Amino acid sequence: MSGLTLPRLTHARLPLTRELCAVNEYGELQRVWIPVERALTVYVDNRELVTLMTLGAQPELLVLGYLRNQRLIASVHEVESITVDWEVGAAAVKTRSGIADIEARTASKVVTTGCGQGSVFGDLMADVDKLVLPAATLTQQQLYAIVNAIRVQDSTYKTSGSVHGCALFRGDEMLSFVEDVGRHNAIDTIAGWMWMQAEEHACTRDPAVMMSGADKVFYTTGRLTSEMVIKAAQMGIPIVVSRSGITQMGLEVAQRLDLCAIGRATNKRFLCFSAAQRLQLQPELAGAKLRVVA
């Protein structure tokens, strides 16, 4: 290695999943596992750089790859050490000679389409406890209609894959459908659409107010992370549905907000992870239960 040394990588190993019980389509409690989402703030030479949302499986490599892909370092040997401390949710990067012009190189931030970079996480979390969601319910029949509407919807995903889809429903009526390479882009687009609808229909003169989400349901093909749950709540939407699952932090935020989070919704199967009182169960619609053959 010609005298070059690799950086020291240090952190404590943590569980990647958490066990819990959720209500299934038959109104029964079912034991499931959900991934544990964590916020990891990256500091480079004592300078705060970014907060990444991650499972935390290999956080040092995540940080190293992030620095490389952001072209802040050109060689792994520029890094002396990366130390991860999960008690404070921080990764401390120490370089050997500093990063030239780091202030100027990181002053202009571009929001990418990536699913794991929660750079606005701190700002979102600061306002969570101020959010109050309206009373609203969804029937199991309406939920099935939503899932079917997504199934028959013409989409880029059906032809090319590699995209996330999000939709806004009133009951089982689809109001807006958006696809993008990242689910965060798609939900932001729907938020913009709701804002424009409020303006066009003269619902309000306050430019900070968007179309009411009180009677709406938000659907996403992607997982329900904390950021997705918070964004839906900020849009005033009390019920969210996902074809995928939910993370631990997403669940905790949903529970704090009394937001109904429904995941793994495909065909007639689903799991209601939080605020199950908002879902009017109709187990007879789920069909016969599959028998498990030993």
Image (tube, grey):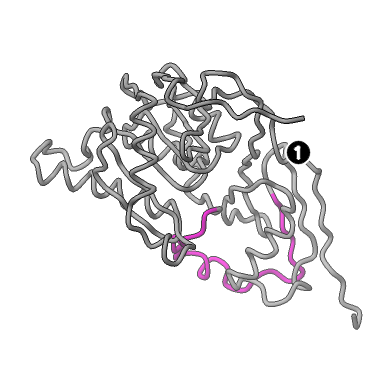
Residue 9 position in % (x across, y down): 81, 57
Relative side of 16 to 158, left or right: right
Question: Is residue 100 one of those drawn in magenta?
Answer: yes
Relative side of 146 to 261, left or right: left
Q: Which structural element holds mark 1?
A: loop
The vertical placement of 17 against 159, above or below, is above
Relative side of 82 to 27, left or right: right
Quadrant of res 74:
bottom right
Residue positioned 53% across, 27% down in the render: 273
Residue 235 position in % (x across, y down): 32, 37
Relative side of 248 to 200, left or right: right
Q: Which residues are magenta?
A: 91-115
Amino acid type at circle 1 is Pro
Residue positioned 52% across, 41% down in the render: 225
Residue lying farthest to the top in this orientation: 277
Question: Is residue 288 one of those drawn in magenta?
Answer: no
Most foreground residue, 265 or 260: 265
Q: Quadrant of the C terminus?
A: top right
Q: Residues within 10 Å of mark 1 (few under 14, many from 20)?
A: few
Residue 210 position in % (x across, y down): 22, 39
Number of numbered tags placed on the structure image:
1
The vertical placement of 228 against 7, above or below, is above
Residue positioned 58% across, 38% down in the render: 247
Which residue is identified by label 1? 15
Q: Quadrant of the N terminus?
A: bottom right
Most foreground residue, 226 or 137: 137
Residue positioned 57% across, 54% down in the render: 50
Quadrant of res 124:
top left
Residue 212 position in % (x across, y down): 23, 33
